[in-house]
Image (cartoon, helix red, strand yellow):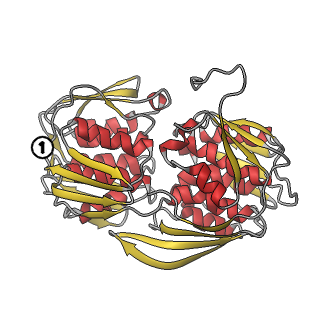
């Protein structure tokens, strides 16, 4: 397990050529669809992080034989659409909201009872947003005041629905589509704004017909999934920390290899380019149905912007890193329409604003975003000091990157959960010139502090 803190010293340019770990969203779905397919699914590039391993362990508990992971390679021996077995105990999703929400959809149509649990952070996250549409389909789901644990009871049978998402959410969309595989008739989901489409792409890779019309996606119940090979691209959400690091450190010249550039995920590239970042997309190609490319990024002088509303859902997971970029830009950056950030692993608007303020940045949280007065005219955009990530892996890594432009050492507390999405973050960061070290608790602090 990763140490409890990260300590970063101010540094020079970021340079080299690296490949970040596999895409977490694709890794989750490759296990889920491989498990309910007929035949042997071979996966390469699988993310060996705690979140994806939670998904893997859940399917092992339901009788699916899964070999690996070994250097990113996994083999899933599918049991077919109706072949899962009742687990002997609750399925632990750890810190992974994607595991819980997508599993809820898949389990809604099973003929057995299952309970989904998670850690303290996940147990506070809202689940009615996924339970409500599933119940409209005929699922029987019990929550604790709308939060986990989720108890999913056998249903007499699901029926397809026409569901308009009230808030853009790839996880809710995916849960409804997965339940639709078990429902009578058609299930259609309509989005208010585009979200990542990994589920739709992968369903098609497994042989499931997927209808697309405008903002709507349709599946028909009873389709057979056929095993296939999945090549997981490098995760653009993980690459985002290095895109920002190289952009804010003068003289940087960094290559990120085989990064997933699915158009529903590249909002971070669009936002950074609007801010003046020097990012080149090289050798665009397809890998297992997903677009990938190499990204070449150089240091640049960033400027503050009003982030276009249409880009917000396409960069929702990358905003902790983008807030750091905004603090290093010249001028004001405004983000609106990002209320989804308040129900992530932490309230990312409140926690990022608190940390930025501790480091001397004028960061004003709003109900649906933030206003940041950039300090791009200063070499030390951040004061030295200590910030607390509140157990949120993306916030911990965002502040680690901020250390590049700090006036002195920057310490990030409560960084254990970095392993959920980016195992090996600190060594890879050091390899490109970021002076980050993993540290234990301070003297007198318990070795395992419960997160607040």
Q: Split into 4 quadrants, where in the image is the C terminus?
A: top right
Measured from the top left, where is residue 185 in percent x and y? 14, 52
Residue at 15% over, 36% down: 85
Residue 207, image quadrant: bottom left
106 vs 214, left or right, is left
Q: Which residue is mark 1?
A: 83
280 vs 382, left or right, is left
Measured from the top left, where is residue 148 in percent x and y? 39, 28
Up the image or down, 31 lies above or below 280; here it is above
**Residue situated in front as seen by the camera: 448 or 87:** 448
Q: How many marks?
A: 1
Up the image or down, 255 lies above or below 232; here it is below
**Residue situated in front as seen by the camera: 332 or 111:** 111
Q: Residue furthest right?
A: 378
Up the image or down, 61 lies above or below 222; here it is above
Measured from the top left, where is residue 223 in percent x and y? 14, 57
Residue at 40% over, 34% down: 127
Residue 378, visible in the rendered structure: yes
Residue 177, visible in the rendered structure: no
293 vs 59, left or right, is right
Q: Secondary structure at mark 1?
A: loop
Measured from the top left, where is residue 310 in percent x and y? 55, 61
Residue at 19% over, 60% down: 227
Residue 220, image quadrant: bottom left
**Residue situated in front as seen by the camera: 128 or 28:** 28
Residue at 17% over, 32% down: 86
């Amino acid at each position: 397990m990763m140490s409890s803190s990260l300590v970063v010293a101010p540094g020079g340019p970021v340079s080299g050529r690296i490949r970040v770990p596999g895409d977490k969203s694709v890794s989750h779905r490759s296990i889920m669809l491989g498990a309910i397919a007929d035949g042997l699914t071979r996966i390469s590039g699988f993310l060996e992080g705690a979140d994806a391993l939670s998904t893997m362990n859940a399917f092992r508990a339901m009788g699916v034989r899964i070999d690996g992971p070994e250097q990113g390679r996994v083999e899933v021996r599918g049991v077919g659409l109706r072949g899962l077995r009742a687990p002997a105990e609750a399925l632990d999703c750890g810190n992974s909201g994607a595991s819980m929400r997508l599993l809820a959809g898949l389990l809604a149509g099973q003929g057995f009872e299952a309970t989904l649990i998670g850690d303290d952070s996940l147990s506070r996250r809202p689940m009615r947003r996924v339970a409500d549409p599933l119940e409209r389909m005929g699922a029987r789901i019990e929550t604790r005041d709308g939060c986990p644990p989720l108890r999913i009871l056998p249903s007499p049978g699901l029926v397809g629905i026409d569901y308009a998402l009230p808030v853009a959410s790839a996880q809710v969309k995916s849960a409804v589509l997965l339940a639709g595989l078990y429902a009578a008739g058609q299930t259609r989901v309509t989005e208010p704004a585009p979200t990542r489409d990994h589920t739709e792409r992968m369903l098609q890779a497994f042989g499931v017909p997927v209808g697309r019309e405008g903002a709507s996606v349709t599946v028909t119940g009873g389709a057979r999934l056929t095993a296939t090979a999945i090549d997981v691209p490098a995760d653009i959400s993980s690459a985002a920390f290095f895109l920002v690091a190289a952009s804010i450190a003068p003289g940087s010249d960094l290559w990120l290899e085989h990064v997933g550039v699915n158009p529903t995920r590249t909002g971070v590239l669009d936002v950074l380019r609007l801010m003046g970042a020097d990012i080149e997309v090289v050798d665009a190609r397809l890998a297992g149905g997903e677009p990938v490319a190499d990204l070449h990024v150089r240091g640049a002088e960033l400027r503050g912007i009003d982030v276009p509303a249409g880009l917000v859902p396409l960069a929702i997971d990358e905003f902790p890193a983008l807030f750091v970029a905004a603090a290093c830009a010249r001028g004001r950056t405004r983000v609106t329409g990002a209320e989804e950030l308040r129900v992530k692993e932490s309230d990312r608007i409140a926690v990022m604003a608190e940390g930025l303020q501790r480091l001397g940045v004028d960061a004003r949280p709003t109900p649906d975003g933030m206003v940041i007065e950039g300090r791009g005219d200063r070499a030390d955009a951040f004061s030295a000091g200590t910030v607390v990530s509140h157990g949120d892996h993306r916030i911990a890594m965002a502040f680690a990157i901020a250390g590049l432009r700090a006036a002195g050492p920057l310490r990030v507390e409560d960084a254990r959960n970095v392993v959920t999405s980016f195992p090996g973050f600190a060594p890879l960061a050091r390899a490109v010139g970021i002076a980050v070290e993993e540290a234990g608790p301070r003297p007198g602090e318990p070795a395992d502090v419960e997160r607040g």
